[in-house]
Image (spheres, rainbow, N blue to C red):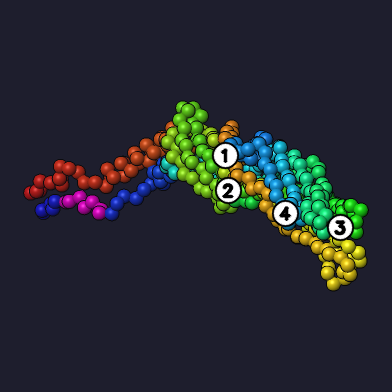
Amino acid sequence: MTAHATHPPRPSLRPPRLRPLAAIAALSLAVAAPAWAATAEQSLLFSSGTQSLWGPDGSAAFGASGYAVGNHSLGISYSLSASTGTVDSQVGARLAADFTDTIAWDQRSAVQVGFDFLGNPSASRFSTDLGAHASVSAHLNLNLLGVPIGWNPALMDVDYRLDIDRSFTAALPQSVTGSDAFTPASIGVGLPTFGIGLAGGAGVDLDVRQNAQFQLDGLSGLVQARHRDSGTTVLQALTLNSAAEQWLSFDLGSAGTWDFSYLDLSLANRFTTQFVMDMLAYVEYGVGIYCGDLGTDSDNIACTDDRVRANLAGVSLFNSPEIRLAFGPLDTGTAFSVEVLAAPVPEPASLLLMLAGSGALLMHRRRRLPLRDGPLRLDQAS
């Protein structure tokens, strides 16, 4: 009887299956970093203080004079002047930030934050104060029928003030206007007769008006992210000039808490003011008898007369230079904070599970691998 050699089975080419313990160990190492969306609003209050209407390099006053109608022989002249003029303004708003307050380690190099400008309702305003003087005179300096006539009465000689106070809700960009007017009643005087058949008079309706325009163009400054422990800072330039939200990306290189604040915030703006005069003025005379309606020849019998009249709308007296109201720079404290998580490290329990799973895998493979010394040979039996 012959004994045949036996050979061990060939090792399986299929990969070994993971045991449940090893699967648990692998899953325990997967750490999911939580992320929460957040919004933070920082209150802002910009104040320009009191500034000159004429600008930092402008005159402290303005004056305008001339003839509203006619000339020195027959007309009406005016003189307007201002000795004081100031403007002040404030803008109340909020700077909103949209962000994720907890950042995973592998996302720290591109942390996105969105910024938006929000005006507080009716928390913004601008006001102007102007002190001025106005005088208006009539003129009749003619030689009528050999009789020299010189008549130059003052129709108005008054001091007045113009005050604009306008409130609004700020937005970017935005244009806000305001106005104020000084409007005395109609003023007229009669012409003296000088002892002869002479009639006449002069009058004026005067409206001096100030128009002001305040233009908000945008907000600019810096956003600073500062690591609370190391003091490392990251800066990004911020510019808001529309209703659209601006998104910035921050590279926060270290784990820990990063505090965000705003630096050197300022408002780009323009301010102008204009002074105009609206006037309805007349001067008239008649010499003789039966003049009828002065200035109308058809009803005259033994009279010569004339009337000069003008409806002057929007005669420009003064346009101020375009000035910039001094808003800012403004710094804030911490507006919001972001937490960057540290790189994941296996916990002790997870490490034990991992080692146990690895040991189970090695034992499983050892049982299925063939012996290195080759197959066992048996001696032939006789």
Task: Please name which of the two marks, 1 or 4, marks the residue nearer to the observer.
Answer: 4
Q: Which mark is residue 200?
A: 3
Specify the segment rendered in magenta: 6-13
Q: Give the CA distance from mark 1 to mark 3.
A: 61 Å
Magenta stretch encompasses residue 7: yes
The residue sitting at the front extreme is 146
Amino acid type, label 4: Asn
Residue highlighted by disc 2: 217
Q: Is residue 148 left or right of residue 172?
A: right
Magenta stretch encompasses residue 47: no
Q: Give the CA distance from mark 4 to mark 2.
A: 45 Å
**Secondary-structure class at tag 1:** strand
**Secondary-structure class at tag 2:** strand
Amino acid type, label 3: Gly
Q: Position of residue 343 (x, y in %)?
A: 42, 37
Sequence-first disc among 2 and 1 = 2
Q: Give the CA distance from mark 2 to mark 1.
A: 11 Å
Q: Which mark is residue 194?
A: none
Q: Give the CA distance from mark 3 to mark 2.
A: 55 Å
Amino acid type, label 1: Ser
Q: Residues within 10 Å of mark 1 (few under 14, many from 20)?
A: some
Task: Please name which of the two marks, 4 or 2, marks the residue nearer to the observer.
Answer: 4
